[in-house]
Image (cartoon, rainbow, N blue to C red):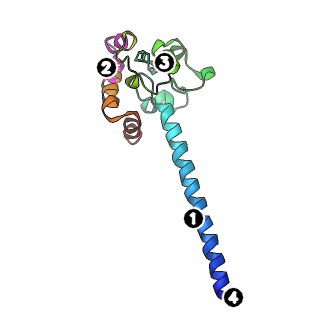
Amino acid sequence: MKTQKMNRKQFVGSTLLAGGALALVGCKEEKTAETQADQGAYCGLYCGACPKFTNGECTGCKGPEETLAAHCKECEIRSCAAMKGVKSCAECAGFPCPKTEAFHNSGNPKGEKALANSKTIQVVGYEKWLAAQAVK
Ligand code: SF4
Ligand code: SF4
């Protein structure tokens, strides 16, 4: 009888431990998604692939206001998308707008890349696109 009680205790203990472990896994996934979200720029570029971002010299255009690079502070795409509350311009009903088109047609290869990524985001969704970038 005593042995049975111990077994129940052990069972309850192990269930609690398993629950705790699952909760931790859940936290880790949330943290990862949060971190990844910071690496997708509003215009469609993936900051996580940039050496400046990975060396910690840049926090990306979704970083805290006080650590933003000068070009991010001046970027009209960033300020507009942040104000509209979209994770990506590709999610904006007004996309492509004159601001994004100016970037896409600027002759800068990053503009072409931003357009190509934005088109992909419109098809697969921001989260799936971001997850695919993170494993590249
Ligand atoms: S162009 Fe603007 S939106 Fe795109 S990464 Fe640079 S600061 Fe961010
Ligand atoms: S209006 Fe243009 S710059 Fe602003 S969020 Fe929409 S697509 Fe991006």
N-term-proximal mark, 2 vs 4:
4
73 drawn magenta? no
- Nearest the camera: 59 or 8? 8
Check disc 2 and report the residue beneath it. Answer: 112
Q: Residues within 10 Å of mark 4 (few under 14, many from 20)?
A: few
Q: Position of residue 35 (x, y in %)?
A: 52, 37
N-term-proximal mark, 3 vs 2:
3
Q: Specify the amino acid type for callout 4.
A: Lys
In magenta, the rendered stretch is 101-113
Q: Specify the amino acid type for callout 1.
A: Ala
> Ligand 1: does it lie within 8 Å of the C-beta at label 3?
yes
* Secondary element type, mark 4: helix
- Cβ–Cβ under 8 Å for marks 3 and 4: no
N-term-proximal mark, 2 vs 1:
1
State the residue lying farthest toward the right: 2
Q: Residues within 10 Å of mark 3 (few under 14, many from 20)?
A: many
Is residue 136 rendered to the left or right of residue 56?
A: left
- Nearest the camera: 74 or 8? 8
* Secondary element type, mark 2: helix
